[in-house]
Image: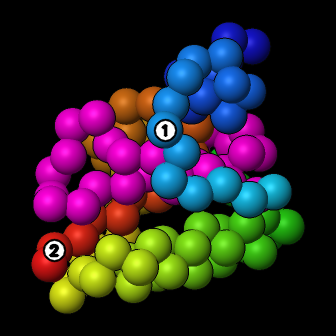
């Protein structure tokens, strides 16, 4: 299986500025922001898409959401949205699950 760019960042094969890291996920700035704050939260567990999650991944998905909330609060967002793009037709470009945090000040 070929590693995605996100897996290469997680494995430190590609340099990136991590905004957040813990045992479950990392957070980086989106290279093509669609809002004043656009952070990607990427689980360290290799899951290609929301279509591939299992019930056992519920805690991981919850962790991504709570981490996004924390980052939005730390960045003093007055409003924000969370977005999973699912599948090519749903706008997913990199097939490693990730959560978009789009925030406004």
For the point 73% across and 45% down, the residue is 44
On whether residue 37 falls in the magenta region, the answer is: yes
Give the residue furthest to the right: 56
Disc 1 marks which residue?
17
Tell me where residue 22 appears, x and y as whole percent.
74, 59
Residue at image mark 2: 104
Question: SS class of the residue under badge 2?
Answer: strand
Q: Answer whether residue 19 is visible to the viewer in this image.
A: yes
Instruction: Name the residue: 77% across, 45% down.
Output: 45
Q: Is residue 46 left or right of residue 19?
A: right
What span is colored magenta in the figure?
24-51
Say which label, 1 or 2, has the lower sequence index: 1
Q: How is the image coloured?
A: rainbow
Camera-near label (1 vs 2) is 1
- Tell me the SS state at disc 1: loop
Residues under numbered marks 1 and 2 in contact, where contact means CB atoms less than 8 Å apart? no
Q: Nearer the viewer, residue 91 or 103?
A: 103
């Amino acid at each position: 299986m070929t590693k995605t760019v996100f897996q290469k960042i997680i494995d430190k094969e590609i340099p990136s500025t991590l905004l957040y890291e813990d045992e479950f996920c990392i957070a980086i700035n989106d290279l093509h922001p669609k809002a004043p704050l656009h952070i990607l939260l990427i689980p360290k567990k290799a899951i290609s898409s929301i279509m591939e999650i299992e019930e056992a991944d519920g805690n991981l998905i919850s962790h991504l959401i709570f981490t996004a909330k924390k980052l939005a609060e730390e960045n003093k967002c007055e409003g924000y949205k969370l977005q999973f793009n699912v599948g090519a037709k749903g706008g997913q470009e990199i097939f490693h699950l990730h959560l978009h945090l789009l925030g406004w000040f």
